[in-house]
Image (cartoon, grey):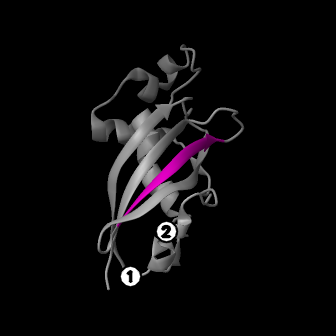
Amino acid sequence: MSDTISVADLPGLAGRQLEPSEWLLMTQERVNQFADATNDHQFIHVDPEAAAKTAFGGPIAHGFLTLSLLSYLNEQKALLPDNLVMGINYGSDKVRYLMPVRVGARIRSHQKVLEISEKKPGHWLMKTECMVEIENEESPALIAEILSMFVVGE
């Protein structure tokens, strides 16, 4: 669950490591739904029998699926300003996919606030380094810098 902080405390978040999210199970159903939504039905994602014959040993999640789950995972432990009107996905920097997420694996996110600044009154831009951990794996699934814009009311 996210926590609320004073807008005056936002600049002090830079450098802060947040608590990791809860674990999330990567299911075949989730992968299939993402494949349907994106029309990306490559066999390594949706055909467990064929995927088992590859170096992956079974189906893997789409990299973009893992990236898209950051919205859900990061919100769990986010620090959000009082009087938040809306949060906007502002972009991503330096996205790197380091290890595939196998169906049946559990993932969670780790966040570190890199920068935060007020771009115009009531509009705060936060850059967060995000790492998606795969349970029982040395290498993370991905590392990305995520940009979020928080619009704060009076």
Q: Quadrant of residue 52?
A: top right
- Residue 131 magenta: yes
* Kind of residue indicated by mark 1: Asn
The residue lying at 52 percent from left, 39 percent from top is 143
Q: Write the start and end of the magenta stretch as one range.
A: 124-134
Whether residue 96 is visible here, answered yes or no, is yes
How far is mark 1 from mark 2, CA to CA? 16 Å
Q: Relative to residue 37, is residue 48 depicted above or below?
A: above
Indicate which disc residue 119 carries.
none
The residue lying at 44 percent from left, 42 percent from top is 67
Q: Relative to residue 132, is residue 90 depicted above or below?
A: below
Image quadrant in which the C terminus is located: bottom left
Label located before the other in sequence (1 or 2): 2
Disc 2 packing (10 Å; few <14; some 14–19; many ≥20)? few
Pick the residue in front: 60 or 7.
Answer: 7
* Kind of residue indicated by mark 2: Pro
Whether residue 61 is visible here, answered yes or no, is no
Image quadrant in which the N terminus is located: bottom right
Percent x, y of residue 121 = 29, 74
Q: Which residue is mark 2?
A: 11
Q: Quadrant of residue 35?
A: top left
**Secondary structure state at the residue bearing disc 2:** helix
- Residue 45 magenta: no
